[in-house]
Image (cartoon, grey):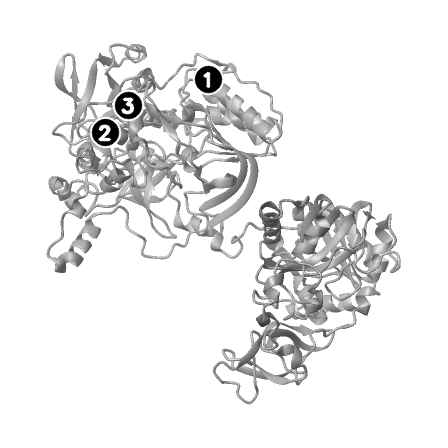
Amino acid sequence: MSGARRIPGAGLLAGAPPVSFCFDGHRHTGVAGESLAAALIANGERVVARSFKYHRPRGVMGIGNEEPGALVTIARPTGDEPNVRATTVELYDGLEARGQNAWPSVRFDLTAVNDVLSPLFPAGFYYKTFMEPVSAWPFYERMIRRIAGLGEVPRVADREIYTSTHAHADILVAGGGAAGLQAALIAARAGARVILADENPWFGLGLLGETATIDGLPAHDWAREVGKELAQFENVTLLKRTSVAGRYEQGFVILCQNLRDAPPAAGDPMPRWRLWKLRVKQTIIATGAIERPLLFANNDRPGVMTTSAAVGYLDRYGVLVGGRIMVAAGDDAAHDAAARLARAGAQVTVVDSRDSGSRIALEAGASVEWRARAVNTRGRAGVTTVRIEGSAGHRWVPADIVATSGGWSPALHLYAQTGGKPVWDDTRQMFIPGTTEQGAVTVGACNGTFDLGAALGEATSAAVKVCEAIRLTAAARSPVAENSHDTAGAGQWSEVRGRKRCFVDIQNDVTVADLDLAVQEGYRSIEHVKRYTTLGMGTDQGKLGNVNGVKAIAEARGEAMSAVGTTRFRPPYVPLPMGVVAAHLSPDQHHPMRRTAAHQLHEAAGCVWLNAGAWLRPQFYRRGGETDLEAVNREVLAVRRNVGLVDVSTLGKIEIAGPDTITFLNRVYTNGWSTLKVGMGRYGLMLREDGIVFDDGVTMRLGEQHFVMSTTSSGAGAVYEWLTMLLETRWRDLRVTLMPVTEQWFAAALAGPKAREVLGRVAEGFEVSNDAFPFMGGRVGRVAGIPARVFRISFSGELSYEINVPADRGEELWTALLDAGRPEEMAPYGLESMGVLRLEKGHFVIGREAEGRTNPYDIGLGRMVSTKKWFVGKEALDFPEMKNPRRRQLVGVVPANKTERLPSSAHLVLPEAPDKVGGSQGWVASMAWSPTLDHDIALALVEGGHARTGERLLAYAPIAGKKVAVDLVAPHFYDPDGGRQSG
């Protein structure tokens, strides 16, 4: 029986309400918010799982994500969740958990016969056995798959809610211990945008029980105060219960946040997990260190745990893990832990391999035996006795807990994931960070610094350094830590080779003998040994066992630890729920959602939102009981007859400057730019190298060497990357600089015959008459008192002005324009209405009419292809095929009977052979009801379409089963001469 019990009033959750939970059909009582592992220990549940290969009993060994053995299945209303570490589940009322990988239960598992047959299953046995007869292979496979494995895959669809989010920060601090808190505080005070993430429910857990003081406060009280101060900063985001799962190139980081363990209340849409996708400029890695267990015979029995875990359950949850505890260690930190366990009421024995050390455990009532070590354990369902070997000989000592401390291993996973190389410190007996990689710095125990005062100083220096890297000035004051000392020691190793099995990987049942066998059979690289033996390939990824494994391999090879090295650290640091990995696939999270500056005003005006690529844009604004079509028709007619206002901030904007800008524009656009005057703009067509239309837009000349290029909303990023590539790799002689500024500007367009009157009321510093401000002109001044760039360009075919102001003045501009347009009853309009307006005018759109195979001649823009200069794509346009009159070309389509509606996604076929295989003459690219013309209109790509105006075809939608007779017409349905937009 275990002597575990609760200590009244102890731990961080003292006073929390009791809750009921169930494990393997047994009802227990715990404390709300404590870990399931703590509750199981407190209720005497020693065997909570079974190991992977031999089905040996497993108990709780760690206290966090390093836990290798205590894996359980949580029964949830939304579906069972297997392979959950009991150390990371917060207890709630009604929680139901069960053991896994056992039959009929983890207490009595018949498949534990594997343990008896273990000599038949050495490392790599599956490469050497079950070869004959071939006909039995399916039987072998079913048998092995049934016996092996861990949790069972749920048989029903996961109904849990997951979410993901995107964010940017100046500095990410990974780890909320003393060093992480100090680094975050320094950066926050300097004004940096900081995200502090820690996997635990509280910051500063490593300071619990710490005897040192920081700035005169007990260490954990200091941590609590720093947490409170950080919470007051608007530039700081605090993320508890959040694991920094992966670091990638260019500052991309993945975080996984546990939002709740308990099922939500009825109707509560609170997600279970959130995936954070971050872009950060600098990362401070303060992930601490993981205590290494000692290796000895039968070191895997329930009751064997790390010393830090044993004392951690007492400090955090007020749970004393056993009544008779043996602490097997070789440093003074373990004596500190033994003293705390003894003061809590445990009978503690310390066996220390050193000749002498701290007397704190002895003074607390523990017995101490020097020059001694644990070498074996006994017990069927958990440790009952421990065999110790010392100067007094060998003997068995009663104990229900063996708390071991073989040294510490800095948690270098995040450091190494992007290429950092750990190096072996022979003095400290640990792997520590090697060269510092760009954009990241390690501090505290993660950096091999275990003295509290030194760690705080290191964190301060690191924070100042990363602030300087992002051009911020930070105060370099480090708090004063008194009574601090190095808690790590040099670590210790046990002599482990012998007849009894000594387990290195607790989850996968990898023993020292397995590693010896792999080396004996010729496996030299640690990566090969890992795969041959499955060392560190479990859900814990070897957080506790890998360094011990490296030591065993080094001894087997007769080499130094540095010669063996480590396996590659790959993300994620912890297992991620599949649901949260796929959360971005939901319609509203497929991209980082971008919003314009007037988003809240659109929302208040009753807009219907549309996901347009990465942007959330108003589709239209519904009034009263309008249908969607009625709302769009109203907005279109308001622009045609009066004036409308549309948010066009999403259009790409690239500032171009330099003495060679005209040469640059001549090369990237098909048309010429040498004659463009300051204060005027020109429409440009950009091609790929194969002569296919890539993007289009207006570029304005604001000064002799200053231009602003407008791109399509969807092409903003691709165009900038393309232009940058050209300048940096092909045209390095050109003196041109580019700057993407889309997000820095808010843009709104006034469109309609009364647009000039509205703009005139708020324009300052420039005239709005047709003579003073002609079509394709650009002016700089103020609009409603806001510094603005105003461009007279039109996508609707009406008189139009695009007004650009700094993004932080966007709401102010939108409100001012609406006020100025009240006499004309100006109405805002959305993306759907804009699409109808451009369709009436006959403007093509990238991705629809220009669909990746379309060249300028196909869409009727051959006149824009200069014959006097070279440009990207010119050679391809000279191929005869590019001017083949049979190519699919842009035409307009109207129903022969104007009262008929065109089918969507229709092909155009010959009336006499509508069902002929391969008989499609083209297809409808865009289609809409035109309230201006009072009938359907469409743009289509038709084979030889330019020469077929007036021909009658059938618009045929086979799936819908609809055929409509249509006439091919010119693509410009409205104001073909352009008088309305230029007058």
**Which label was assigned to residue 489?**
none
Amino acid at the residue labelled 1: Ala
Quick check: 586 left or right of 792? left
Measuring from the top left, give residue 326's x and y in whole percent.
23, 21
Question: With respect to residue 612, does 848 lie above or below?
Answer: below
Q: Quadrant of residue 561?
A: top left
**Which label was assigned to residue 552?**
2
Q: Residue at x 47, y 82 (%)?
A: 917
Q: Residue at x 65, y 55 (%)?
A: 668
CB-based contact (under 8 Å), mark 2 and mark 1: no
Q: Quadrant of residue 383?
A: top left
Secondary structure under the numbered disc 2 in the rendered image:
helix
Q: Residue at x 75, y 66 (%)?
A: 797
Mark nearer the N terminus (3 vs 1):
3
Residue tagged 3: 406
Q: Residue at x 20, y 52 (%)?
A: 146
Mark 2–mark 1 Cα distance, whole angstroms, equals 32 Å
Mark nearer the N terminus (2 vs 1):
1
Secondary structure under the numbered disc 3 in the rendered image:
loop
Measuring from the top left, give residue 694's x and y in whole percent.
61, 60
Determine crowd level at label 1: few under 14, some 14-19, many 20+ residues with C-alpha closer than 10 A.
Answer: many
Residue 229 in sight from this viewpoint: no
Determine crowd level at label 2: few under 14, some 14-19, many 20+ residues with C-alpha closer than 10 A.
Answer: many
Question: With respect to residue 745, does 392 lie above or below?
Answer: above
Measuring from the top left, give residue 321's x and y in whole percent.
29, 27
Residue 289 in sight from this viewpoint: yes
Quarter of the picture containing the C terminus is bottom right
**Which label was assigned to residue 454?**
1
Judging depth in this view, the residue of 737 and 927 nearest the camera is 737
Amino acid at the residue labelled 2: Ala
Mark 3–mark 1 Cα distance, whole angstroms, equals 23 Å
Amino acid at the residue labelled 3: Gly
